[in-house]
Image (spheres, rainbow, N blue to C red):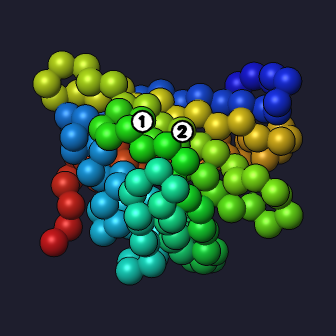
Amino acid sequence: MSTDQNGYSYALTRTLDAPVSRVWQAWTTPDQYAQWAYAVPGSVEMDVRTGGAWKATMRTPEGAEFPLTGSFIEVAEPHRLTLGMDVPGRPDPAAMSLELTEQGPRNTVITLRQTCDTAEERDGAELGSGMLLDGLTGFLATGPKA
């Protein structure tokens, strides 16, 4: 966690037991993404290209649902993806980037980064990103459901 001139930032890093190509596919394939990212099945749409749109309806552990929309700001397959998320009342999208670094033939280091406007926003985003990484780790261990 850090404070910089543009806001409050965090970075989360994990080593995943999967090759970069599998991690990329899990993050950019709607049906796979829905299985690990707490999305309502059938709600995920992705046009994975720079400027392409995405949307998903997320479900909290308590069962509340909320829609998210945004665009892909940067797509550099299979190593970097920057997602913009539409935030009501904010003129520019909130951006989250992920970097995938191959570590041998079977492992990938993933780093998620985001800069937020407030410490509270950062803390919530960091918690959500940690949950995403937990879900992704479990998904990669068990594989996609048919």
**Residues at discs 2 and 1 in contact (Cβ within 8 Å):** yes
* Type of the residue with mark 1: Arg
Q: Disc 2 and disc 1: Cα gap in Å?
A: 7 Å
The answer to whether 96 is drawn above or below residue 54 in the figure is above
Q: Is residue 118 left or right of residue 105?
A: right
Q: Which mark is residue 97?
A: 2
User: Residue 85's x, y, as percent?
Assistant: 63, 57
Q: Residue furthest front?
A: 51
**In which quadrant of the rendered image does the C terminus lie?**
bottom left
The answer to whether 77 is drawn above or below residue 32 in the figure is above
Picture quarter containing residue 24?
top left
Earlier sequence position, callout 2 versus callout 1: 1
**Residue underneath mark 1:** 80
Q: Is residue 52 left or right of residue 18?
A: right
Count numbered badges in the picture: 2
User: Residue 140's x, y, as percent?
Assistant: 25, 47
